Amino acid sequence: MTKKLSTILLTVAAVIFSGFLPASDSLGISKAYAGLRPAASAGRIKEAVETNGPGVDSGELKGVWISYLEWDTMPRTEAAFRQAVDGMLDNCVSWGMNAIFLHAHSHTDAYYPSELLPWSKFASGIQGEGPGFDPFGYFVNAAHARGLQVHAWFNPYRITGYQMSWEDVSSQSPAKQWLSDSTEENDRWVLKQGGEYYLNPSIPQVQDLVVSSVKEVLQKYDVEGIHFDDYFYPTLDDSQPEAWFDKPEYDQSGSSLSIANWRRENVNQLILKVNRVVKETKPSAVFGISPQGYLGNLRSDTGMFTDIDHWLASNQYVDYIMPQIYWGFEAKTSDKSPASFAFGENLASWIQLKDKGPVKLYLGLAMYRAGTNVSDHNEVSEWLRCQDILKRQVEAGRNSGKVSGYCFFSYRSFLEEAAAKEVENLKAVLRK
């Protein structure tokens, strides 16, 4: 994929759903893993943990997302993989980070040896086939050796999507097994919408699978947190049978709730169960969610069905919320009016919501946009004119007194030439 095409795809995706796509697909392995060093010794691990925690409450969170797209570029042999991870994590430390948010489950799969789900295609090249070692486990140990927290990142319902087709799904996957066995009862536990496959959020057994996978990671690895992003319900249209998704389950439920609120309650039940299993399995770990960054979209009755107001008013759902505020300060609407989703006004709306309950507020910020021609309805894109947007966003969060940390999408965006000045300016504030 060319850099120009990749940038166009990213811009479209971010505007539509603030999704997780790469800033460029042209990154070479040598660039991605620059500055490699040997793995840390046991003594260094002990020293780092005693000095830095690690732990969310030890200070401001400064994290970076490492997604399945980074996993997909990693070397497949164990020795080369370890060297690459060491270089990546050394880079994270040099940028001033104290945490990584690392994909553990991206497509109802696993980046470690799991008893519940098949190996991820992005860990080995073929879903269902392992790489012959535990790559996720090495990431955790190497991160802790450098004083970095590890938050295991889950996409709760996604089965297919960008770079992952139904043909890529292993016969070992519960999704394929449910659709191919002779039991009619589980035929609707997997649904197809807009050409992609999802787990059905309304099915208790589906929720239990997600919860069990979270518990499995917590039992196997000493991670500091469990992290969900914004892949909940797809966009639906209940007036079109081909876009009904789980409407038949609603019709059969006899619920007195509206269908939108019934769907929100399905997500709520999953989040409640996950929060409970996190606290029961590892009380020191945190659970948080990174939803789309604009509250107007989150409160929609046609997609996602994230009950954001309910979650932030309670201590029963999440420990933190990390909205993906991926816009600059000067974003405008198509008629050139200041956009309500521009960073300043958007941050104020999240602070107002955060103040209604005990949930911490972190900000998800868009390194992938640095130095690119983002369509923000300015004569010249703010992201081309300015090289200190992320620096000023961190400073604005700090000045508010309401923001507890930041996370940047994504790791390899920090290595893009177009982002170099933005990275240098950001490093200056992250190291403070």
Image (cartoon, grey):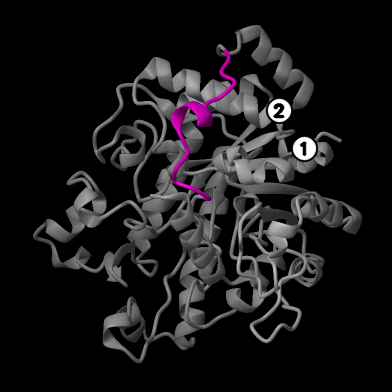
The region drawn magenta spans 23-37
Q: Residue at x 38, y 32 (%)?
A: 112
Q: Residue at x 73, y 43 (%)?
A: 421
Vertical placement of 49 versus 389: above or below?
above
Using the rendered image of the protein, determine whether residue 101 is visible from the camera's viewpoint: no
Vertical placement of 331 versus 368: above or below?
below
Q: Amino acid at mark 1?
A: Lys
Q: Quadrant of the C terminus?
A: top right
Q: Residue 63's x, y, as percent?
A: 67, 41
Residue 359 covered by magenta stretch: no
Looking at the rendered structure, the secondary structure element under dot 2 is: helix
Taking the image as shown, residue 79 lies to the left or right of residue 53, namely left
Q: Which mark is residue 199?
A: none
Q: Quadrant of residue 76?
A: top left
Q: Residue 364's x, y, as percent?
A: 66, 54
**Disc 1 target residue:** 427
Looking at the rendered structure, the secondary structure element under dot 1 is: helix
Question: 286 and 335: which one is in front?
Answer: 335
Taking the image as shown, residue 389 lies to the left or right of residue 140, namely right
Q: Residue 32's x, y, as percent?
A: 51, 31
Using the rendered image of the protein, determine whether residue 205 is visible from the camera's viewpoint: yes
Question: 181 and 81: which one is in front?
Answer: 81
Residue 25 covered by magenta stretch: yes
Q: Residue 309's x, y, as percent?
A: 67, 73
Using a 10 Å C-alpha cutoff, classify the residue at mark 1 as few (fewer than 14 neighbours), some (14 to 19) or many (20 or more): some
**Disc 2 target residue:** 94
Q: Amino acid at mark 2?
A: Ser
How far apart are the two marked residues, 1 and 2, measured between alpha carbons? Answer: 8 Å
User: Of label 1 and label 2, which has the lower sequence position?
Assistant: 2
Q: Residue at x 59, y 20 (%)?
A: 35
**Tags 1 and 2 in contact by the CB under 8 Å rule?**
yes
